[in-house]
């Protein structure tokens, strides 16, 4: 599972527990102005993953790590599709982050709220 937070104009995504091992990544740190938006999307887990570059994939159990799909680099960390959030990025290494969080709606609200101009 991932923990998503906002710190000083940056989106911080931290993998917890064994997800750090499966994803081969501990943390992603992205400027908020590179975040296009976020949606709670349980159907994302059924999408084709593409080619695994680094990480773990056991169909219907876990998808975690870096994958290439249709020329884009996508980061996955999902075991429970019902808790998946898709974060769209621009100008970053990854085009999308698809991560499992404890509360998808709260995570989307946090990201969307942080993107609004004051």
Image: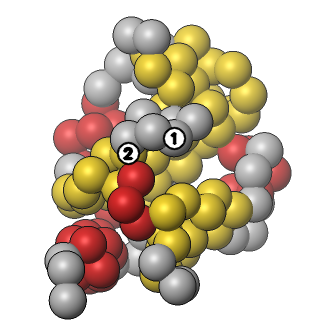
Residue sitting at x 29%, y 30%: 46
Residue 24 x, y percent position in the rendering: 78, 44
Is residue 1 at all visible to an observer of this figure? no
Closest to the observer, 115 or 15: 115
Identify whether 53 is placed above or below 60: above
Name the residue that disc number 2 marks.
89
Identify whether 38 is placed above or below 71: below
What label does residue 92 carry, if any? Answer: 1
Bin the neighbour count of mark 1 within 10 Å (Cα to Cα): few under 14, some 14-19, many 20 and up: few
Secondary structure of the residue carrying tag 2 is strand
Mark-to-mark CA distance, 1 and 2: 6 Å
Residue 82 x, y percent position in the rendering: 28, 57
Is residue 1 shown left or right of residue 85?
right
Residue sitting at x 39%, y 10%: 70
Residue 44 x, y percent position in the rendering: 28, 39
Identify whether 44 is placed above or below 48: below
What label does residue 110 carry, if any? Answer: none
Res. 45 image quadrant: top left
Residue 109 x, y percent position in the rendering: 21, 78
Is residue 34 at all visible to an observer of this figure? yes
Identify whether 83 is placed above or below 55: below
Secondary structure of the residue carrying tag 1 is loop
Is residue 67 shown left or right of residue 69?
right
Is residue 10 shown left or right of residue 88?
right
Is residue 77 shown left or right of residue 113?
right
Asked whether the beta carbons under mark 1 and mark 2 sit within 8 Å of each other, the answer is yes
Image quarter hosting the N terminus:
bottom right
Residue sitting at x 36%, y 19%: 48
| Residue ranking furthest to the front | 118
Residue sitting at x 45%, y 11%: 71
Bin the neighbour count of mark 2 within 10 Å (Cα to Cα): few under 14, some 14-19, many 20 and up: many
Image quarter hosting the C terminus:
bottom left
């Amino acid at each position: 599972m991932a923990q998503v937070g906002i710190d000083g104009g940056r989106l911080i995504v931290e993998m917890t527990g064994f997800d750090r091992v499966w994803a081969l990544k501990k943390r992603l740190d992205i400027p908020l102005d590179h975040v296009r938006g976020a949606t709670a999307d349980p159907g994302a887990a059924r999408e084709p993953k593409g080619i695994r570059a680094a990480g773990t994939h056991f169909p219907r159990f876990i998808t975690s790590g870096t994958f290439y799909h249709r020329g884009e680099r996508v980061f996955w960390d999902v075991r429970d599709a019902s808790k998946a959030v898709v974060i769209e990025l621009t100008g970053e290494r990854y085009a999308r982050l698809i991560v499992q969080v404890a509360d998808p709606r709260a995570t989307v609200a946090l990201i969307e709220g942080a993107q609004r101009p004051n």
